Amino acid sequence: MKKLICTLCFILSVSMILIACSAGNATNCYLSKDKTRAVIAPKGEVIGDELIQWAETGEDSSEGNENAINLANTINSLLYETYGGRDSMPDYYLGNCYSVSEEGSNNDVKVGIVLTDGADSTEIKDLLKAYESDIVYKYVKYSYSELTEMQNKIIDVLDDKGIKIYESALSGNYEHICVGIDKESFDDSLDAIAEFANEYNITVTAEISGAVELD
Amino acid sequence: MVTKLFTRNTAITLFVFVVLMSLFLPFSLAFAETGMDLIEELAIFQMRQASDASSLFSETLYADSAFNERDVIRPDYYAGHYVKDNVLHICFTGKSVERKNEIADLLEDYGDKVVFEERTFSQSELERYASELVSELERSECIVYASSVDGTVSSIVLSVSESSYDRALDILSRSAQVPGLNIEVEISEPIQLMSNTDLIAGTEVISRISTNEFHLTLSATGTYNGSNAFLTCGHDVKSSSTLYTSNNSVLGTASYVRFSDGKSGDFTIGTLSNSFSPMHKTKTGSSSSALWDGYMTTPAKNTIIRKYGVNGKYAYGKVTSTNNTVYYDDIGYSISGLVKVSLSSGTVQSGDSGSPCWTSDMKFCGVLCSSVTGYFYFTPYGTIRNAGFSVYSQHDGTYTYHNTSKHKNNCSLCGGYVYESHSGTWSDYNSTYHKKYCSICNQTIYEMHGDYYDESTGKCTKCGRTGSITVESLSILPLQQKISQANTPCFK
């Protein structure tokens, strides 16, 4: 009898561990060692080294040099004057970022023009023809409106679940969304964010943040 | 005397050392934090060297000057100083060589960042000449609004009314000429004292909602629906309410307030009261200000942004992301379309809402609304512009002829004069003159070949004329002015 109880306890423990592991896989989450940042990707998606580096250091690898920043500002102005504002710009144009060529040094930073993969982007490419040698085109899964909708949606979703969220933003490369969560809610938020990431098929980066105050 | 000088110089040196240390240390730390590259750091260091040498020289000059109720009387060795290409140029007259050597010793540590030049006239002499000329013109019933001297180029500029211009030229051309002295006459409007009701961004705005009083910061002035308008933050402002300045004067009415749940941006466009004059100027410190030079609709990531608020004062940092939605838990509002800036230096405090945000090259780019430790958020100007507000961010007005090398613009917003070189290309006119047409001020300008004739090549370096030229007297500058003013030259 004693042996049977021991065997049952052993089986139960192993099952619990297996359930916990499978749940961990379902969330597909990388939590930083200091537990202040997390990267939550949809099930089955590999979390890249850059995001793991961000989680551990809080630093974004896409720094621009002075020339690239000036060019990015010039392109912003050109597009604003051409279209009269972000709302009138093509939905397949998400924004710009900085891109360092693999073999290059910091001087080889180019401006990345981020477009939705598969969209006909002839119009914007024609407009930016003059800067062709200093830009590279990068392609992402979602359009601007899809991504911003998710960015705004996550605030409502987490707020409804009683999680204190303070801000959301589009990532610098327009591939995922970022959220700032209250310290007390951070641990609880990870499952809810994982649910969101799976439902909307989007990677989310989360970090502990303070309350944003109106000044 | 030597002991006295030594004591004074030692005190000045120590004072400047302390000032330099207190100025340089925060910059060094800021650079370390922001990761500015070495080249940028070196450029700023070189600029600071000339600037610091200039401060040290100014202290010495101050000590050597005399003061009375009206004027500062500069020492007779001093003709002027200026900074060009990161080098301090000090113009001496050749008088008081001993003092010049002492000053050279004092500035020795700055090496080739300080150069000495010689001039014929001291600034005091020029001021005396200017004063005599003004008296002479006024005796002849000319209306003189101002006179200014520039010892670095040995020139006197007399600003007279339009009706007095021809008479002034005539009187000056008949008066005794002083070799090497440039006298220019310009037509001017009456000089008015800047009123204290001119609006500088970065000053306080007060909003009252029922019994509550909110202290905000003025972001900018501009136009909205064809009227002069101002800008501040949208929260803590009620639509159609009256906004006030810090001394309780009515600033204007909140015509358009953008601050609601789920919407983009946080700003108020107010119609400006007639008793205030709009400006394109912002506070940059408790007693310093600067003019904006254009605008930026949406700054790119990593752009350096500066702000000035009534309580947190001056601060700056880098854009970390350009499309943020912020959720204000206490009121349940989410506001989208904000730019987030990571603070490198300075703070943001309550009352800073509305602070103007601008770039390093003085482009106005938005209105601050909120903050969290280490960061602040602002509404980019592009969003505000789409709501119908156009910021005053540049000099207005048109250019008029100033002298043979420049035209000028008297800006009605800041009252300042902007001088720019004439456009156009010089061409040979006749054996005495070459000419060019400036399409900006709409004038034909004439100059004598003689000033630019290179004897070794037998060529005028300005217009390229070869062969013979006729050299006329160069001592009649007022007449030359007169010639330049006309569309066709007048030959004696």
Image (cartoon, coloured by chain):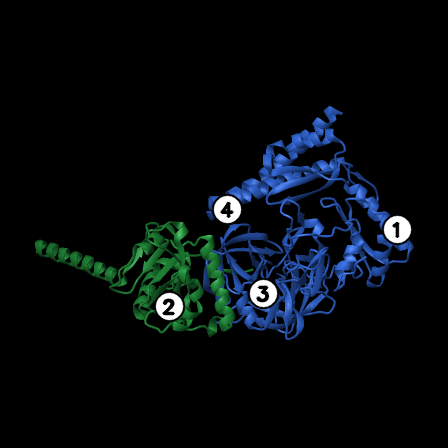
**Which of pointers 1 and 4 lies earlier in the amino acid sequence?**
4
- Density class for disc 3 (Cα within 10 Å; few <14, some 14-19, many ≥20) is many
| Residue B312, percent from left and from top | 59, 53
Kind of residue sitting beneath label 3: Cys
Kindly identify which chain the residue marked by label 2 belongs to: A
Tell me the quadrant of the picture where the C terminus of chain B can be found: bottom right
**Would you name the residue on which mark 1 appears?**
B135
Secondary structure found at label 1: helix
Kindly identify which chain the residue marked by label 1 belongs to: B
Kindly identify which chain the residue marked by label 4 belongs to: B
Can you tell which mark lies on residue B23? none
**Would you name the residue on which mark 4 appears?**
B40
Cα–Cα gap, marks 1 and 2:
71 Å
**Which of pointers 1 and 3 lies earlier in the amino acid sequence?**
1
Q: Are the numbered discs 1 and 4 placed on the same chain, yes or no?
A: yes
Whether residue B263 appears in this view of the structure is: no
**Would you name the residue on which mark 2 appears?**
A115
Kindly identify which chain the residue marked by label 3 belongs to: B
Kind of residue sitting beneath label 4: Glu
Kind of residue sitting beneath label 2: Leu
At horizontal 53% and vertical 44% (from top left) the residue drawn is: B43
Is the C-beta separation of discs 1 and 2 under 8 Å? no
Kind of residue sitting beneath label 1: Ser
- Density class for disc 1 (Cα within 10 Å; few <14, some 14-19, many ≥20) is some
Side of B162 relative to B332 (left or right): right
Cα–Cα gap, marks 2 and 3:
33 Å
